[in-house]
Every structure is written in C-alpha cells, then in structure tokens.
Amino acid sequence: MPHKINGLQHLAAAQRYSLSGLSRLWQETAFRHEVAGLAASLVFFALIGAAPLSYVLLLMLFLIVSALEAVNTAIEEIIDRISPELSSTGRHAKDLGSFAVYCGLVAWALLLAYAAASAFVVPALAGLAHP
C-alpha cells in the first residue's frame, strides 16, 4: 500500500492531479469550444456594459460547465475502457453525461439572455414609461 501523504504535500499532489486533468480536458474539442465561448461571452459582456455580478455568474457557470465536461469525459473514458462493445448501458451513461453538460450550457445561455435583456430591453421599456 502506498504511503499516505498529508499537509502541504497532499495539497501539492492534488494540484498536480488537477493540472493533469485540465491537460487531458484540453484535448477535448468540446472543452476548447467552451473556452472560446467564455472569451466571446466576456467580450459580449464588456460591449453591453454588463453588471459585475453578471461576470461573476459567468465565471461560476464556466467552472460548473468545465466540471461537468470533465466528469462527462471521465464517464466516456471509463465506458470505452470497460465496455468497448456497444451496449445500451454504456450509451445511457454517455447520454446522461452529455445531458449534464447540456444543462450547464443552457444555464449559460440563460445568463447571456438575461444580460442582454438587462442591457437593451429593460432600458427601452423604461424609456417608454417616461416619455
């Protein structure tokens, strides 16, 4: 049994494992698209003058989507390793992981829609109320 590490050594090892996971996740096209989506969203927020809270929510949603993408990738790798043949169970596991990512992306889209409405629709409606 390997020697259990504690304290700062454990923290450093966890950091290395996380960076290794990030390196693996970067190999996924979907994750690279999500990073590009974050960059585009940040530019969009800057252009519309989004509130600081919108930026915080965007970064939180990006981290959640990234975590979901990592778990989805892990599920796909495990299924491909233990069940290389086509099976309904493997397909269901992969579909559920994909659906989890999809839900995160829908939440992201809702935030973008909210920010756009706050920037354009609400001020236009306020202008109608006070001619």
Image: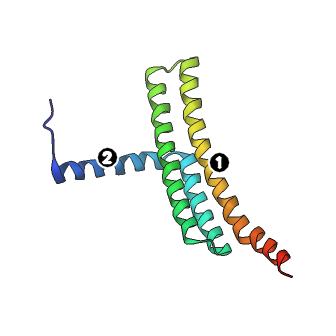
Question: What residue would you read off at disc 1?
Answer: 106
Instruction: Please say if 104 is above or below 122.
Output: above
Q: Position of residue 52 (x, y in %)?
A: 55, 71
Q: Is residue 41 left or right of residue 59?
A: right
For label 1, the SS is helix
| Residue at (57% x, 42% y) in the render | 101
* Extreme residue in the bottom direction: 131
Q: Nearer the viewer, residue 35 or 120?
A: 120
| Residue at (54% x, 34% y) in the render | 97
* Extreme residue in the front direction: 130
Q: Amino acid at mark 1?
A: Val
Residue 49 seen: yes
Q: Is residue 117 left or right of residue 89?
A: right
Question: What residue would you read off at disc 2?
Answer: 17
| Residue at (62% x, 73% y) in the render | 46
Q: Nearer the viewer, residue 96 or 19?
A: 96
